[in-house]
Each structure stands twice: as structure tokens, then as C-alpha cells.
Amino acid sequence: MLNKVARGFAALLLFLLAIPMTGAGETYFTGFLQGLYGGGLDSNNPTSSEMTASETRLQLRMESFSNSAEFFGRLDFTYDDYYEPATDLELREGFVKFKLGGKFDFQIGRQIITWGTGDLIFINDVFAKDYQSFFNGRDDQYLKAPQNALRASFYSAPGTFNIVFTPRFTPNRIPTGERLSYYNPMAGEIVGGSDYYFEGRMPEAEFKNSEIAARFSRYIGTADLALYFYHGFYKNPTGIDMMAMEAFYPRLNVYGTSVRMPILGGIAWLESGYFDSRDDNSGDDPTVPNSQLSSLIGFERQLTSTLTANLQYQNKYMIDHDKYVNSLVPGMIRVDEMYHLITARITQLLLMETVTISAFGFYSPSDEDFYGRFSVSYKYTDALTLAAGANIFDGTEDYTDFGAFKQNDNVYIKITYGY
């Protein structure tokens, strides 16, 4: 408890110090108070609680501008008793942004970073995600997890260069068996509860284990083209140390490209990336992912003034699949050489755009699994929004991307008051 209080004072102090740091020409405070309550639909889910959410969240947001710099911060206080009463405080964002000359700008501190073209499909966006929040009904903004980073941009005639340096590797936040169950390959089944709480082994806290991401982008006509590079680790603990019997984050490089442009009355995007698995260059270690090539194509169009829809197709091709198959030992799960995924989103606005109905579906014909996100929200006043939704999983096998969570079907309600 004392540690949480100390963290709270430290975060508030950062907020207060930020005003003089920027010279504080103008400062604005906003935020929201939100209640989120949800429960599981599968009585056989092995988690400790049937509830997936029972939290009250207060977010304080501050923006401060001056001629020399800007400060932006978001601080979340949460009381959550989905299982046992607990409080939490998280600095979601807290960074200073300033320019150097007319061509450089820097953004330093805790921040949420995103790039790439996909709609909830990430190839070259190798920044941390929070799938625990994504699967239990929190706002979409919580899918992106914060990380401590230095971001620099250089603007030139050929295009814009961005580089992000993250000194300490930041992994994805994935289901760990506490709130949501998951498939455990060592147990050979879907597990949850205190006996199966899960955490991957982090890389050592050394500079050689830092993350570096870079992007070059420019417009050619109406097309937005980009090249990407990433040096770090897989964001999920996809490697298994058989000696220690624990999961870890294998080393990874990613090389990619994308284009996004208007066409046929809508927006189309193409993206691809080569995932270089640095801990398994030969492709014959079944405990570490093989290198792979991933590609994505998508199209979105506004069908009427209040109805928007999009469609995406992604595939992943495993390099050296024959070596991978030959290295498997009896009992290990065999992954297909090619993976296919289709997604569709449809959003309908009603009643003077105060009601939003949304459905997003992921379906893999190769893995035969499915994940659907469904929600409806009503803007009762400018400040008050009421929402309800569901997360539905299904899969033929327990070990596929969405089949691994098929006992976590849940529904929720959410009330948000903005100020």
C-alpha cells in the first residue's frame, strides 16, 4: 500500500512539475470517471472469479503548451474488485515534446506509440499492446500499452524519419490466468486460477536488450508510403526454455513496408513485414518461432452517411517449415506453413449520431477459430455515455490464437462521465 501511495505522489508531482517545465503558456485539465462491470458466460472457465470486470476508473488528463515545449499526461486511478478488492495507479502517459530547429522534434517520457495501417491487425506496429484490457471491455484506447521511450522525428524533403528508442523491453499484456484463462502448452489444456498464473521471463535489464524502431514515410500523390525496421524481441513469450520449463521472449528483427491511399470512394491499405527470428535462424528449433513473412490488404468505405464498413485479409508464411516439421518431437503441436485471417468491421450511427452500434469479427479459415467484439453505446448527454458489449471466442482447437481463449466469452456494461 505504501508503495502505491508513493507512486501516486510521484505521478502527481510529475504532473505539477510539468507546468513550469514547459513554461506553461496554457494548461488544460480534463478526464473521465468510468464504471465497468462484466461477467463470463462459460461456467467451466477455470479462472478464480466469474467476473471479468468490476472497476471504477478515474482518469486525470493534463495538457500544457508554451512556445518552447508541450506536456501531455494521463493518470489513471482504479479500484477493482472483480476477485479481491485492489487499487491501482498507472501513469498512462507523461511526456514532454519540444522542437530543435525547424526540422527535429523530440518526445520523451512515458507514451503510447502506434504506426502501421491495419485495423486491429499489427505487422510493423511492434509496440506494446494490452490484450487483457482489449478482451474485457475497456475502451479501445487501452489496447495500446504505454512504454518509456525517446521518440525523435526528422523532417526533410525526401520524407519524414522517426526513430523510437525504448531502453527497457516492454512486452504485451496478455491473459495470465488471473482474469482470463489461456492455453498452456505444458499442461496441454486451457488453464486459469492461482496454480497457473503466468509470466514470461523478461530479457536482462541491459542496454543490448533495448528496443529500437524506425520508420521512413512520405506521400507520393495521395499515397502514404512507409518503410519500417524493428530490433528487439517478440512481444509475447513465444519461446520455451525446456531446461527451466518457462516461457521467454525470443529475439526479433522486423523489416516492413506499407502503403495507404484513397481508391474507389474509400481507403485501401497494403502492408507486409518479414519477421527475422534471431534465436532460430536455421528454423530447426521447435521451441522458438521460425522466421515468417506476413502480409495484409484492407479496404474501408462509408456506405451511407451513418454506415461504415471495412474488410481485411492477412496471411503469414512460415520460413523453413520443412525443417520445423522434422524437428518436432512426438506430442508437440504442429503449426501450418500458411496462416489465413479475415476480419470485418461495421459501424452504424443512429438517432442523430447519439447511438453507435459496432461489430468487429476475426475469422481464421486455416485455424478454424473466431473472435467477435460487439458493442452499442448511447451518448445520453455531452458528458454521459452508456455502453454495453460482448466478447465472443470460438475455435476447433484449444491452442490456436482465439481458440486459446474460448472459455472467456463475456458481456459488460460501461458508464462514462467525462469532465
Image: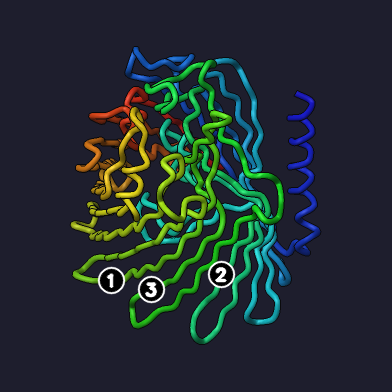
The amino acid pointed to by label 2 is Asn
Q: Quadrant of the N terminus?
A: top right
Residue, disc 2: 162
| Mark positioned earlier in the residue sequence (2 or 1) | 2
Instruction: Determine whether 56 is above or below 108 in the image.
Output: above
Q: Residue at x 30, y 54 (%)?
A: 317
Which of the pair 288/46 is nearer the observer?
288
Q: CA distance from mark 2 to mark 1?
A: 24 Å
Residue, disc 1: 262
Q: Residue furthest bottom?
A: 157
Marks counted in the figure total 3
Secondary structure category for the residue under label 3: strand
Query: Which quarter of the picture shows residue 368?
Result: top left
Image depth: mark 2 or mark 1 in front: 2
Residue 245, percent from left and from top? 54, 28
| Mark positioned earlier in the residue sequence (3 or 1) | 3
The amino acid pointed to by label 1 is Pro
Q: Residue at x 70, y 76 (%)?
A: 100
The amino acid pointed to by label 3 is Asp
Instruction: Determine whether 41 is above or below 254 in the image.
Output: above
Residue 39, percent from left and from top? 40, 20
Q: Are there few (<14), some (14-19), or many (20+) residues within 10 Å of tag 3?
A: some
Give left or right: position of 406 versus 99: left
Q: Residue at x 50, y 48 (%)?
A: 234
Residue, disc 3: 224
Which of the pair 165/72 is nearer the observer?
165
Residue 281, percent from left and from top? 46, 55
- Answer yes or no: do the residues labelled 2 and 3 have beta carbons within 8 Å? no
